[in-house]
Image: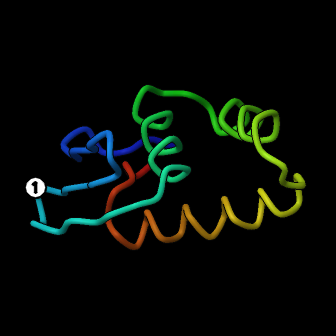
Amino acid sequence: MTIKKNIAISENGFIFNPATGDSFSVNGMASVILTALRVGESEAGIKAGILEKYEVSPEQLNRDWDDYMIQLRDANLLETQ
């Protein structure tokens, strides 16, 4: 799963899709996930880093991850596989 190459992601959580003109604002955690996906980090690697750094159960992380990936797909920000 990767972010489309043309998607602009700022350090402060602003996302811009030049293909559609849509822009989004995300929180710090979402920005970290987007940046990690952009550089090709695996889902497992990203999740492992989150579990080490934050107090969240693996079950909650998996639910939140799935919800967030649906949002990214709906916003047309992910590469199609």
What residue is pinned by disc 1? 18
- Residue closest to the eye, 40 or 51: 51
Image check: 42 left or right of 59? left
> Which quadrant of the figure has residue 2?
top left
Total count of labels: 1
How is the protein colored in the picture? rainbow
Please report the residue visible at 27 percent of the width from the left and 55 percent of the height from the top: 14
Image check: 70 left or right of 46? left
Q: Element at badge 1?
A: loop
Please report the residue visible at 30 percent of the width from the left and 45 percent of the height from the top: 4
User: Badge 1: how crowded within 10 Å, few (<14), some, or many (20+)?
Assistant: few
Image check: 17 left or right of 56? left
Would you place residue 6 above or below residue 22 in this image? above
The three-letter code of the residue at mark 1 reads Pro
- Residue closest to the eye, 44 or 53: 53
- Give the percent coordinates (x, y) of residue 81: 45, 48
Please report the residue visible at 39 percent of the width from the left and 53 percent of the height from the top: 78
- Give the percent coordinates (x, y) of residue 9: 28, 44
Would you place residue 80 above or below residue 21 in this image? above
Please report the residue visible at 50 percent of the width from the left and 33 percent of the height from the top: 36
> Which quadrant of the figure has residue 74?
bottom left
- Give the percent coordinates (x, y) of residue 11: 32, 39
